[in-house]
Each structure stands twice: as structure tokens, then as C-alpha cells.
Image (cartoon, rainbow, N blue to C red):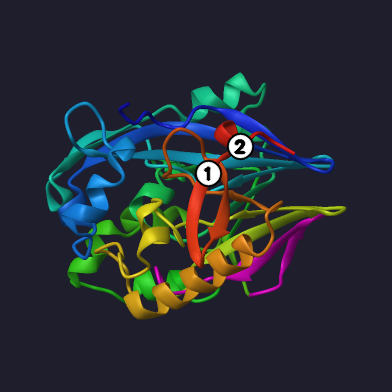
Amino acid sequence: MSAHASPRETISVGDISITYLPDGEASVSETALFPAGTPELWNAHRELFDDDGKLLLSLGTFLIRTGDRKILVDLGFGDHTVAFPAADGEFRSGRLLTSLREEGLTPEDIDTVFYTHLHIDHVGWTAQGDALTFGNARHVVGEGEIDYWSSLGDNPMAAVGPGGVLGPLEGRADAVSDGAVIAPGVSVVATPGHTPGHCSLVVSSGQQRAIILGDVLHCPVQLSDNEVSLVFEVDAEMGKRTRDRMMGELAGDPHAVAAQCHLTGSAFGRVLRADSRRSWTTLSAQGVS
């Protein structure tokens, strides 16, 4: 069975809801994007590939509704269909505002935008021209993230960064650190490595909990082999330590839900542990409890 991008779907964490809002998908070369992956490892995960034999990654955003608050976590890739030569692939995107309307909301309804980090596929709907798309929202990013991208100059890594997004965000983005609470039941956990200021969000209500991972994890092969890192990691070794820590925490709590915007089939799942090995199962496969 070939992979398909994650659909729009909602889970409940106590009295808080989290909805995955699709923006698009990317078809890429697994060997270009994850050079440490072996043929044997990829052959064990053919369900991650599309009909053309490309690794499929979803592109999208999470909407958190807690009380009267409406928070978007990351802003997708934007309204673009472009070739991505660095990964021998293509990005096809542009559905986010439609997905938002399907939830009965407009950009004006969003009060907070939280960026897990500022890679190009997480900031695409930040602005239309010079105006912020979500003009009523507080924009929040991890401490040090904007400084890192602003300092790169001609560094090749800048090609996958926020680019022109930094202009509209100037003076509008608040930096937060580990432990910050951005809304009732929604707190920040620093998860550096993928980028210096990368952060995830912990959503909790009563005994229930979900972690919106950002790019701590990209695809389930990284649970089979933690050495498989994305080629665009800023600090791959730190990223491996962070991933091991976060996946260990999730595996230690079988009721905790993980959310990741690049996964296929479903953006929501759980990390399971058996015989010291970790694996991923989608909520659609396991059922929601």
C-alpha cells in the first residue's frame, strides 16, 4: 500500500482539541534527505513511499483550541508547487487556509502563532506580501531561533531557512524559553538540535497529554535507527540526543499522543516499546483512548 498525506483530523486531550490542518505534501529521495539510512532499513518501511517510489512527507499545521484560545503551531510551506533539487523531489502545497476554513475559522480568529522552528516548510503562510497573514496573532518562537537565521549570511543552510519571512516578523515575534506557558494547558519544551531554537509543545489536560514534536522526528525509520538524521540538521548529534530523550519519554507513557506534521497516514500516533525497540503506530491504527 502506498503512502498518502495525513488528512485533516482532530483529537481531544481532555477539554483541549488539536486538529491537523493539511497544507500539502512533498515527494523526495530518501537517500538524499536521510543519507545514513540503509537500503535494508528503507525496504522495511515501504509503506512510507508513494506510487512513484518517492518518500512521501506531509506538510501542514496544528490548530490548538483551549478555552477561547485558537493557536496555530507552524505555518506550512505556503501556496507553492516547486522542485526541490537538493532532495531530488517536489513540494506541492497551498491548502492551509482552506483547511482552516473547513474548521469554521478565518485568519482573523487566530490569536497565537507558535513556530517550532523557522525552516522554510514551517513558515510558508507567515506573510502575504509584507502583511502578516494572521495579523491579530501573537507570533512566538524559541529563544535564539531568529538570531541564528539572521546571522547566516551566505551560509548554504540559509536556503532552507525563513528568508523573507524575517522582515514581516521583525518586532512582531516574541522569544520564549523552556517551560514557558503560552496558553492554558499548553507549554513549551526546548528540543534543540534540528535548529538551535527548536521547541516542541506539551498539551495537557487532566491525566491526558500530547506532544507536538515539530521536527524532532521526521519519519518512523528514525525510531528503528536513531542515527538516521535529516541532512539539514544544524546540530545532528544534539538532534539525536533530543530525539532519543523525547522518544523515550513518549514510549514510557503509552497513553501519551505524539503529533508530527510530516508523517503520512495520520499526524497523530504513539511511540511503543517492545524488547527495547521503539516503533510508531498511528492513532487510526491503534484507536484513540
In the depicted view, which residue is nearer to us: 140 or 210?
A: 210
Residue 274 falls left or right of residue 219 = right
The secondary structure type at the circle numbered 2 is: helix
Q: Earlier in the sequence, mark 2 or mark 1?
A: 1
Q: Which residue is most to the right?
A: 206
Q: What residue do we see at 17% from left, 50% from top? A: 87
In the depicted view, which residue is nearer to us: 167 or 229?
A: 229
Residue 217 falls left or right of residue 256 = left
Q: What residue do we see at 19% from left, 59% from top? A: 38
Q: Which amino acid, mark 2? A: Gln
Residue 225, x across and y down, in percent: 35, 64
- Tell me whether the residue at label 2 lies in contact with that at label 1, contact meaning CB atoms closer than 8 angstroms: yes
Is residue 134 in view from this perspective?
Answer: no
Q: What residue do we see at 18% from left, 62% from top? A: 35
Q: Which residues are magenta?
A: 178-195
Dot 1 corresponds to which residue? Answer: 281
Residue 99 falls left or right of residue 17 = left
Label 1 neighbour load within 10 Å: few <14, some 14-19, many 20+: some
Residue 238, x across and y down, in percent: 41, 79
Q: Which amino acid, mark 1? A: Thr
In the depicted view, which residue is nearer to us: 49 or 135?
A: 49
In the depicted view, which residue is nearer to us: 256 or 88?
A: 256
Q: What residue do we see at 31% from left, 57% from top? A: 163
Dot 2 corresponds to which residue? Answer: 286
| Image quarter of the N terminus | top left
Residue 197, x across and y down, in percent: 48, 72
Vertical order, 182 against 195 (above or below): above
Q: How many angstroms separate mark 2 from mark 1 (CA)?
A: 7 Å
Magenta stretch: includes residue 126: no
Residue 83, x across and y down, in percent: 16, 39
Is residue 237 in view from this perspective?
Answer: yes
